[in-house]
Amino acid sequence: MKLQLLIVFVLSLDKFPEKCHSTTESGKVLSITASTPEQVDILRNISSQFETVLWQPASPMHIMANSEVHLYVPGESVLTVTEQLESNQVTHSLMVENTEELIEVQTRNDSSDPRKSVSYYERYHSLEDIYFWINKTTTDYPNMVGLRLIGSSFEKRPLYVLKLSGKASNTPKKAIWIDCGIHAREWISPAFCLWFVDNCIKYYNENRDVTEMMDSMDIYVLPVMNPDGYRYTWTTKRMWRKNRSIHSNSGCVGVDLNRNFDANWCTSGASSNPCDDTYCGQYPESEPEAKAVANFLRSHKDTVKLYFSIHSYSQMLLFPYSCTHEQARNHDELHEMVRDAARDIQRYYQNHYKYGPGSKTIYLAPGGSDDWAYNLGIDYSFTFELQDRGQYGFLLPPSRIAKACKEGLMALKSISLKVIRKPQ
C-alpha cells in the first residue's frame, strides 16, 4: 500500500508533461562516412558543434575512417553542416528526413488507458503513464507480480522493480534481471520491458517457454532505470541520453549511467568531461540510479544468474567484455548463446542481428552495467541493442514496436532457457 501511495504522490507532483515539440524547423539525421584522417577530424569537429547530436557512435572519439556515422542535425544547422561536409568532400546522405514528424507519431495518444486498448503495448508511454501502469499491473496481478522500490533518481523519482513469479518453490529460486531505459532517448527499451511483463502475465500457463521461465526463476524487471532523463526526452529534448544530475564544477548536466559502473571505469571509451554524452561521472556509482541497481544486485548476487540490459539501436546481441579487449572466462559459451539467438531471430523474423563481445562488435565502452554484473559473478550477462539499424534509429515508429519486442523476447527466452536447462 505504501508503494502504491508513493506512485500517486509522484503523479501529483509531475502531472502530465507537455509533449516534446520543437519550435524550429524539423531536424534531419545524416549518414556520413569520413575516408581520410583529415575528414575524421572535420567530422569530429562538426559533431561537437551546431547543437548536433551523435546517434552512432555515441562519442566523437569513436568516429573512425570508413565507418558510418549517424548525426542528428537541428533544422537551423542543416544548411551549415551540409555545406561544410560538401566543401570538404565528406560523403554523406540523408537518413531521416523529418524528425519532428516522427516525434509527433511517437508521442501520439500516449496516455491511453491499458484497460481500453489491445494496442497499449504498441505505443510509447510517458513516465507518468508507466508509473500508472506499474501501479495497475501490481494491483491486478498480486499473486504473479510484486513491487520493489530499490531507490530513487537524482530528481527523487522512484526506481520501481517488478518481480514476476510463477509456481511457488520451497527453496529460494534463482533469478533473472532485466533493466530498460538506462539511456533516456532509447524509447523502445522501456516499451520492451512493458511488453515483456505483459507477455509473461498473458501467457503464463499457456506458453510452455514462458511457464518454464517463470516456474524456474524469479524475474526482476526495472522498466525505467533513468526516469529523469526519460521524462526530459518527453518534455524538453528528445535526443537526450544521460541522467539529469547537476555537477558543482560544471554548468553541464547529466552522467551516462552506462559509463558509471565500476568496470574499468572512465578509461578509454568514456569521457571525464561533464559536457560529453559519455561522461563517466565523478566516481564509480556516483549516480543514485547506478548505485541503486548495483546495491540490489550485490544483495542478490547469489540468486541472480542472468543479467539483461535492453538498449537501442543497431540490432546486436552483446556480451562481456565492452570495457576491455580481454575475453570473458566463458566466452565460447556466451558466444554460442547469442549466435543461436541471432539465428532464431533470422529464421522467424527475417531480421539480421550482429553478435559478439561488446568491445570487438562495437567499440570500447568502460563502466557498463553488463560488464560490472559479469565481474560481480553473474556469468550470463548480456546487452541487447534492439531495432533498427538506422532507418529510424531512436525514432522507431510505434508500428515497429511489436516486431522489435518479439525479436528481443525471442533472444531473451532462447538464452534464459539454455541456462535454466543447463545441468547443474
Image: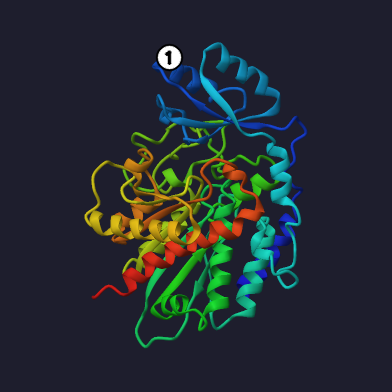
User: In the image shown, does 280 or 387 lie closer to the viewer?
Assistant: 387
Quadrant where the C terminus sits is bottom left
State left or right for residue 126 relative to residue 172: right
User: In the image shown, does 39 or 150 lie closer to the viewer?
Assistant: 39
- Find disc 1 in the rendering and name its residue: 38
Residue found at the very far top of the displayed protein:
87
Q: Quadrant of residue 15?
A: bottom right
Query: Amino acid under label 1?
Result: Glu
Counting from the top left corner in percent of width and height, residue 138 is at 60, 75
Q: Residue at x 50, y 33 (%)?
A: 274
User: In the image shown, does 418 or 243 lie closer to the viewer?
Assistant: 418
Q: Quadrant of residue 84?
A: top right
Residue found at the very far left of the displayed protein:
329
Q: Residue at x 21, y 55 (%)?
A: 329
Where 65 sits versus 282, above or below?
above
Counting from the top left corner in percent of width and height, residue 214 is at 45, 77
Where 308 sits versus 134, above or below?
above
Where 239 sits versus 381, above or below?
above
Counting from the top left corner in percent of width and height, residue 213 is at 42, 75
**What's the coloring here?**
rainbow
